[in-house]
Image (spheres, helix red, strand yellow):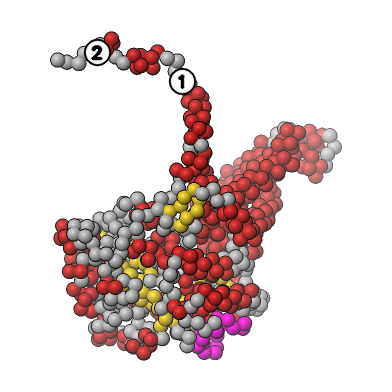
Amino acid sequence: VFFVVPLITLLSLSLQTGSIDTGFRLTWHFGTFWDSISTYHVQFIRSLEYGTIATVIDLLVAYPLAYWIAFHGGRRKTTYLLLVLLPFFVSFVIRTLAWEFILSDQGILFGTLKSLHLLPESFHVLATSTAVVAGIAYNFLPFTVLPLYVSLEKVDRRMVEAAGDLYASKKEAFLRVILPLTIPGIFAAFLLTFVPAVGDYVNASILGGPSTTMIGNIIQSRYLVFFDYPTASALSAILMAGVMIGIFLYARVLGTRSIEEYV
Amino acid sequence: MTDQFDPSRMDPAFWRGLTQRRLSRRQVLKSAGAGAGALGLSAILAACGVKSVVSGNPSASPSPGAVGSPEWWAKQTQAGKLNFANWPFYIDVQGGKHPSIEMFTKDTGIKVNYREVIQDNNSFFATIRPTLAAGQDTGWDIVVLTTNSPVLTKMFNFGWVIPLDQSRMTNFNQYAGPLVKNPSWDPGNKYTMAWQSGITAIGYNAKAIKRPITSVQDLFDPTFKGKVGMMSDNQELGSVGLLAVGVQPAASKPADWQKAADKLKQQKDAGLVRQYYDQSYIDALQNGDTWISMAWSGDISQAVLNGHKDLRLVVPQEGGMLWTDNMMIPQHAQHPVDAMAYMDYVYQPKVQAIIEDYNAYICPVPAAKEVIANDLKDPATANNPLVFPSAEEAARLKPYYAYKSEQELTEWDNLFNAIAQS
């Protein structure tokens, strides 16, 4: 009920026309969808792009990290995991604002470097797409680490030893035993990171510039600033459909088949 | 005679019901699904519509006994408390407290729950709209909305504001200045009293910018590439764009809007604009992220007081945009008498002086000037033309465009939002 009712409301709203003054009536106006796509396709593509880059960065950072904790963490495993999770105890928005403060043009980092003439005066990171992608990657890193850690932890160490006994080098043991066994974990990590990353709008609004608007920002302003509920709903529906298709394709290519093959 | 249980007198249908095979959960769900199918998906979808608002007639005087009529006001009593929703950094602060509010509580016994919850008109309106549409109390007794925002008109048109008790406005009638008394947006102050007015002008960092800033065109100067802050608010952004192409916003035509939008688009495409900001433009200016920015008059004065000595404010030669924030009592407010008491209380010159000495926006009470100069010993604020503008300076301040229809507003919004959000 909690999933289906909002979903139906959303779809219904996207097909209505009217304004907040006169009320919205269901008119099966599919035109909203085409208008939304033609007006905001740039932001859609940008969101998918940012989401993908941030997810890939997260996977590249998180895999070695989770691997190290799972295989070499020893007795302090839980402590290391806690350290990864620690930023979670501070609100998402506050953490992003802290980065804005640290990275500001004359802030503690760049202000110092600039006064030492290590950086040109015009150098800035805020208000660029780099800042937004980095912000997303930073904020969603724990979502990537945890599923990877769980699947790496579950890997039967005897299999790795067996690979060694069969004259596999360490690299081969990793590539042909550990990596395939953790594919489901990678898939879960990808889902948990990519889906919220694409819909994120906090990073773009705090760390972004004039041309880094993501689709989440558009949806937010359509709902709350312009009270244009149909367009906002249509955009949300398109985003959801797009992400779902993406995930489905990904699952077909990498997910389920690999899981069946290897597990 | 007592009603005794007699099986023979029971409705046979009930017996059938009791003896029949029970429906399994699955069957119930299935039949519910079938029922829904029969009803048609469209019916369900249509049921989720957003209802229209029955709009009151703002110009008609309240009928006897209606909310806001003298009879209604006569029946209301003071509750001893009050919930006040205002914008951030908009009232005097000393040691984490608000002296002017404490004075009010001491004088009247009314406790004020002062909250700085309004970041911009639209998103605040979005939070109170559903409650008001459902005919319920928003939890606020006073809210503050701006003249340049379409939201204010919506509040009036929907009949969501309680007409003021004109008999409880003695201080207002005596001390309110010409800018806020009987204003064009609320003739006769039927619904609102001004909190403060202000100017949208240009703020800049005198350490980074050595030459004098005089014109709106300075926001378009390529030497400030990547260091220009613009506002994301459509009304503000559009108006400054119109000033830049030499058109008076209030007298503009849709063709002018397009020209203004083109000008702003060039500015953005040339990489001049750092970001389109909400309230946070002032942080960017203080941090050095921007050197020159669209700015609200009081913010810069407060920033200078807080130690950012390099910041300056200029009203450009093309003129500054004048807006007024208005206090009003939303429908179904629980403490209207307390709200009236407060709204009128701040029009005493000695109270307004305390608020104004901190705020440095345009003071709604000209008589506060004497108090600030003599009692608070702050001649800088008292003689600040941005706080107490002379008639001549006030003439340089421009009104915003008044939308003639919903279509116009949508056209304006789409045009300028496409620049701020892309």
Query: Can you identify the residue that label 1 sits on?
Result: B23
Identify which residue, A192 or B58, lies in the foreground.
Answer: B58
Q: Quadrant of residue A138?
A: bottom right
Identify which residue, B278 or B57, lies in the foreground.
Answer: B57
Q: Label 1 amino acid?
A: Leu
Is residue B372 magenta-colored? Answer: no
Q: Chain of mark 2?
A: B
Relative to A29, residue B241 above or below: below
- In the rendered image, residue A28, in percent from the top left (x then y), is placed at 54, 48
Label 2: element kind? loop
Magenta span covers which residues?
B200-223
Mark 2 and mark 1: span between their CA atoms? 27 Å
- In the rendered image, residue A57, in percent from the top left (x then y), is placed at 68, 54
Q: Quadrant of residue B171?
A: bottom left
Relative to B403, residue A262 above or below: above
Few, some or many residues within 10 Å of mark 1 (<14, 14–19, 20+): few
Q: Chain of mark 1?
A: B
Q: Label 2 amino acid?
A: Phe
Residue A144 visible here: no
How many callouts does the rendering have?
Answer: 2
Badge number at residue A62: none
- Residue at 51% x, 59% y: name it: A222
- In the rendered image, residue B331, in percent from the top left (x then y), is placed at 29, 58
Identify which residue, B393 or B298, lies in the foreground.
Answer: B393
- Residue at 38% x, 17% y: name it: B17
- In the rendered image, residue A262, in percent from the top left (x then y), is placed at 75, 34
Query: Can you identify the residue that label 2 sits on?
Result: B5
Identify which residue, A13 or B405, lies in the foreground.
Answer: B405
Outermost residue, right side: A167
- Residue at 50% x, 82% y: name it: B247
